[in-house]
Amino acid sequence: MDGSEIKQLAIVSGKGGTGKTTIAAAFAALAKDKVMVDCDVDAADLHLLLRPKILTQEKYFGGKRPHVDLEQCTQCGLCAEVCRFNAIDNGVVNSISCEGCGFCSHICPEEAITMREAFSGDWFVSETPYGPFIHARLGIGEENSGKLVTVVRKKAMEVAQERGLELILIDGPPGIGCPVTASLTGVNLVLAITEPTLSGIHDLERILKLSDHFKIPSMVCVNKFDINLGNTAKIASHCKKNGSRLIGEIPYEPRVVEALVQGKTVMDYPCNEVQGVVHRMWKEVEDSLKVKKCLNTKSFVTG
């Protein structure tokens, strides 16, 4: 399958904790002929619900760290003097404090400091009960997560082409920073998950501005809409004013938490009212992307 024929859906949120991963996992249970990608590499958790079996594991080198040749080093102290992070002293680099800026390597009069690629984390190709899954694990305190997002998305496209899959389902990171930009570039549709709080409204406006900047059609889902009906009405008004379709209002349901605690998607646990809303949302997304009808109704667990 040609890459241009493969549709890409990014599920994002302006802030964390809105239920983005919960919805992504529910869609993974509903749709067929897709590959899932967890682009929230800084705090990946979609694997907790998809129960992946790792097929391949690759190392990711996302940045550089200074290496000091102590035989060339004259202990002049210039590197320690100019390092604003206090990350180097007498030729010894504190890897936790070091930001990898490389200034010490440029300032060293003996050219004793060189910048070398640093191991930043791992990325994986896995198989799940719902299909192939590409995900990653960034090391503690590591950066350049936007580059790692690009790596896992590229691999997802390769897997989709190899297997003839028509959809890439992206669980994006929160916020509007570099990892989010890397998650949105080139997608066909954005689904923004929000909540009826002041911070939820504020950050929803930011993420919709970002999708509008990239000229990507956007849809909105309000999770736990009934905890503040006034704010839900404000979100609906904002969507209408700015051309974003509000396709779902999910009620607060304690059984959603029960499902997550047991490592299950809401489609694999008796959450009837939530399942109905998620089902209708998926149909809206499906119609918008113009993918073939691929609803997996066997995923429903009622009760």
Image: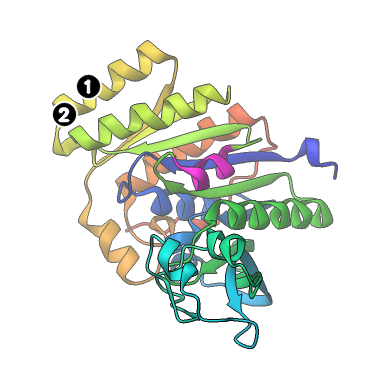
Residue drawn at (22%, 36%) of the image: 199
Residue drawn at (36%, 39%) of the image: 14
Decide which of 110, 182 is in the foreground and name it: 110
- Side (left or right) of 11 relative to 251: right
Instruction: Give the Cα separation between the discs numbered 1 and 2.
Output: 6 Å
Disc 1 crowd, CA 10 A, few/some/many (<14, 14-19, 20+): few
Residue drawn at (52%, 69%) of the image: 137
Q: Which residue does the numbered mark 2 point to in the structure image?
A: 229
- Side (left or right) of 57 relative to 296: right
Decide which of 162, 71 is in the foreground and name it: 71
Pointer 1 and pointer 2: residues touching (CB < 8 Å)?
Answer: yes
Task: Tell me residue 95's x, y (percent).
Answer: 46, 75
Residue drawn at (39%, 42%) of the image: 175
The tag on residue 173 is none
Disc 2 crowd, CA 10 A, few/some/many (<14, 14-19, 20+): few
In the image, residue 249 sits, relative to residue 110, either above or below, namely above
Decide which of 278, 227 is in the foreground and name it: 227
Tell me which amino acid carries mark 2: Leu
Q: Is residue 121 visible?
A: no
Q: What is the magenta range?
A: 177-184
Q: Secondary structure at mark 2?
A: helix
Task: Tell me residue 277's x, y (percent).
Answer: 37, 39
Q: Main secondary structure of the magenta part?
A: helix
Kindly indicate the quadrant of the structure image that contains residue 200.
top left
Q: Quadrant of the N terminus?
A: top right
Q: Which residue does the numbered mark 1 point to in the structure image?
A: 233
Kindly indicate the quadrant of the structure image that contains residue 184.
top right
